[in-house]
Amino acid sequence: MTTTTGKPNILIKPTLETKFHIDYSWWEKSSEDLRTYLLSHLLPEQRERLSQTDEARTVDYIDPDTGEVFELDELGLAIQIAAEDENFINQQTSLVDSIFRVFLADGNLPMTPVDLAEATGRNANTILKTLSGAQIYKGIRPILS
């Protein structure tokens, strides 16, 4: 007789239909600094201004697609502004950074490698191989359900 512990099987191999997202709890356990990494995705003038302050002022942000109002800190707002730039996601940006930027721009909505391929212009199989290996890149993990 077999029993289950209720824990997800971490040995499940992701497929092209598996959805991924940024797991922010990974960042809490990581030795990497999330704020520094987020600043690296901003436009140069935004990065310089925000890297000189630790203040956490918030502003209302209206999603241009849905009209929904969100409260964002200045860094979150700067990311949304940077995401509107046509070069935010481009072929010169590393694959992992491009994928991370897609999640930033889309509010960390879960996406499959096929969705990510469409958004980045990269190969879905390459994305799958990168994200499903033993190494976790920048907290990008599969959603195990």
Image: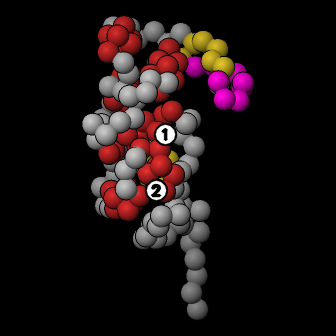
Residue 6 — which label?
none
Q: In the picture, residue 32 is in which quadrant?
A: top left
Any mark on residue 113, and which?
2
Which amino acid lies under the numbered mark 1 shown in the image of this protein?
Phe
Q: Quadrant of the N terminus?
A: bottom right
Disc 2 and disc 1: Cα gap in Å?
12 Å
Q: Within the magenta stretch, is there residue 65?
A: yes
Q: Is 105 placed above or below 99 here?
A: above
How far across and how far down the image is residue 92, in percent?
27, 36
Q: Residue furthest bottom?
A: 1
Mark earlier in primary sequence (2, 1): 1
Q: Is residue 108 magenta?
A: no
Q: Is residue 30 visible?
A: no
Q: Position of residue 91 (x, y in %)?
A: 31, 40
> Which residue is more in the foreground, 1 or 133?
133
Identify which amino acid the numbered label 2 is placed on. Answer: Pro
Write down the region rendered in magenta. Answer: 64-72
Question: x and y percent of residue 128 in the render?
Answer: 39, 60
Give the camera-side residue of 122 and 22. 122
The one nearer the camera, 39 or 24, is 39
Image coordinates for residue 27, horizontal then vertical, percent: 40, 39
Dot 1 corresponds to which residue?
A: 103
Label 1 Cα crowd, 10 Å radius (few <14 / some 14-19 / many 20+): many
Whether 73 is drawn above or below 93: the answer is: above
**Who's the residue at 39% across and 35% down the image?**
89
Q: Residue at x 59, y 69 (%)?
A: 6
Q: Secondary structure at mark 1?
A: helix
